[in-house]
Image: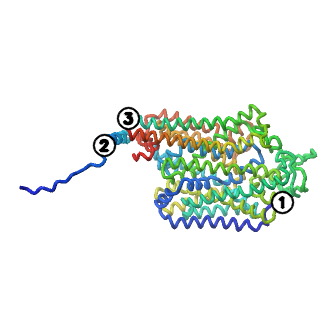
Amino acid sequence: MPDRPARVRVVLAEVGRPRAAADRARADLAEQNQVGEALLRGLMRAQFALAVRLAVVVGVGLGGLPLLFAIAPSVSTVTVLGVNLPWLLLGVVPFPFLVLVGWAYVHLAERNDQDFADLVERR
Amino acid sequence: MINAAHNPFVIPTVVLMTVATVAIGFYGLRLARTTSDFLVASRMVSPAWNAAAIGGEYLSAASFLGIAGLILKNGVDVLWYPVGFAAGYLALLLFVAAPLRRSGAFTLPDFCEMRLGSRRLRTLATVFVVFIGWLYLVPQLQGAGLTLATVTGAPYALGALLVCVVVTANVALGGMRAITFVQAFQYWLKLTALAVPAIFLVLVWNADGRPSPVDGLTFPQATVVTIEHPATLTMTDGSVLTVKAGDELTFPAGAAVPAVAGMADGLDWLLPGRGGSLFGTYSLILATFLGTMGLPHVLVRFYTNRDGAAARRTTLVVLAMVGAFYLLPTIYGALGRIYTPQLLLTGDTDAAVLLLPSAAIGTGLGGQLLAALVAAGAFAAFLSTSSGLLTSVAGVLATDVFGRGGSVHTFRLAAVAGGVIPLLLALNVASLDVSQVVGLAFAVAASSFCPLLVLGIWWRGLTAAGAVAGIVTGGGAAVAAVLVTVLGPPLSGWPAEAVAQPAAWTVPLAFTTMVLVSLATRRHLPGTVGATMLRLHAPESLHL
């Protein structure tokens, strides 16, 4: 009888259906096939729409000011705490406003990223 | 004349600040000898440190001296400069920050090559990086000359030469490169140097019975004004006086400040929209909102973030830090009218920040220390911004112009070349307002790199030919406008306005050309566009 090597049990770690599905989604993305394309386009559209929406908020909020001052000059003569309103609207208010919009963006963009990651992992 | 020439603290403080900067740079160099050391080290840096470093590099002479000077002279309308300088970071955050970090690009030419794979586009991007870098460096050096002349009475050329030599040597020896600590330290120094004196200035103003900066300006002390630019003055008794450069006028304490023809006064200063047109205002808004993302020294720092999400958070912190800083120049601009009204006559309004502490608080110990602090902050502004700009300019010169070797020797050669040319320009081109020249640099960046980045990141249809065409027409038009403004004959009417604030027409021109030419050359889409988009937009947590 020829010598046989001792029998060895081979166990593949982490075998399971969900994992296989996630790998397929990753492969779809990496291969750039139609499914992967559609996934990525969805993410890009979500992120771009978010950025444009917030840019419009800033564009209207700040960009509207010169027009407002031109159309309604009486706004410029209103004083708050002894300071003319335009000085406050341009010298103080924009900075916290910009930070607030930026904070909202970071928060929402991270949620978009997370939604995309969940979609890929769970598919 | 109020100046700090007899202030014994200014020179030691400025020297100490410069030496500290160079020393931290060299110490850091010993710790991090190779590029990979630097990258690994900087990825351990938290967003807060990284953000302070970006802010330190960004707050230039224009922010530190220029804005206050412009506010002093022109009033409420120029508040759009600080608003735009800060809002530029929001545009960067919304459209560029995370994908740019994921692209792995270190410079704008790198991004061009990574996204579109075109050597021609890379060369064109290099030309624009160098042009914007130099355009931005010139006012930094001129600001240094002005500062040293104002606080010590040294010749104008000396300050420019000094900053240029320190920065070039530092960059050439690699000292400032990538030293996050130095830049972060300089952000906090600049903030302190404006904030602490501002508190005292407001207290003094309050104690003086809150004089108005709008009307009825008087000289707080007996003042001798040396006129530097020809002007027509209207005295309070109605008489008109024409003065030329070199004339000396003496005003006793309490004398009314004469009105200068062509300069905003009273209500023009206080109320918006009276000094300029809506076109000019919107053009400035467009240039500053969209220009920040295209500045060469801003982009480099994004690579030091850990991943795309960290790049977003860093940008948000930068926005907050820069915004906090920009609350301060307005105070200097308004109080400058009350305590340093002679600047309205001399036209040297960029010196307001430097002269205010001793003018308002007095030339006692307190006033002298605050004046020295402000001077040190100003030098921190020149050193950090110039170093960042020169590093970027030398980087692209070394890789794309002096050959592709990228050796240390080539980089040093490039640093010297990149530093000498703006120095020659600074010494020979007539001095414009610091903020105005920087505003033009923003306009060029907004008309060239902004469309390239935004379309490159969000639109698959962009082709190399489209990008080249857009940069050449939009960016080229903005460059032409800059050259006419700086070198050309004075214009009047609407051409003057379209040339002085070109962004309102050059930015749409660049975007439109880029899109149309890309559509026309659709057959030449890079085949790798899908893979590139995946890399730019997929979150790193997926480990694709």
Q: Say which of marks 3 and 2 sits in front.
A: 2
Q: Quadrant of the N terminus of chain B?
A: bottom right
Q: Same chain, marks 1 and 3?
A: no
Residue B254, label in figure: none
Task: Give x and y (percent) for residue B48.
Answer: 57, 54
- Chain bearing mark 3: A
Closest to the observer, B50 or B479:
B50
Q: How many marks?
A: 3
Alpha-carbon span between mark 1 and mark 2: 83 Å
- Identify the mark at residue A16; answer none if there is no mark: 2
From the image, tell me which residue sits under label 3: A35
Q: Residue furthest top?
A: A71
Quadrant in the rendering for residue A107: top right
**What's the distance in space between the residues labelled 1 and 3, CA to CA?**
74 Å
**Relative vertical location of residue A96 with respect to residue A46 in this rendering, above or below:** below
Residue at numbered disc 1 = B1
What chain is tagged by disc 1?
A: B
| Image position, residue B201 (x, y; %) | 78, 55
Q: Secondary structure at mark 2?
A: loop
Label 3 element class: helix
Query: Are the residues under marks 3 and 2 on the same chain?
Result: yes
B121 lies above or below A34: below
Q: Residues within 10 Å of mark 3 (few under 14, many from 20)?
A: some
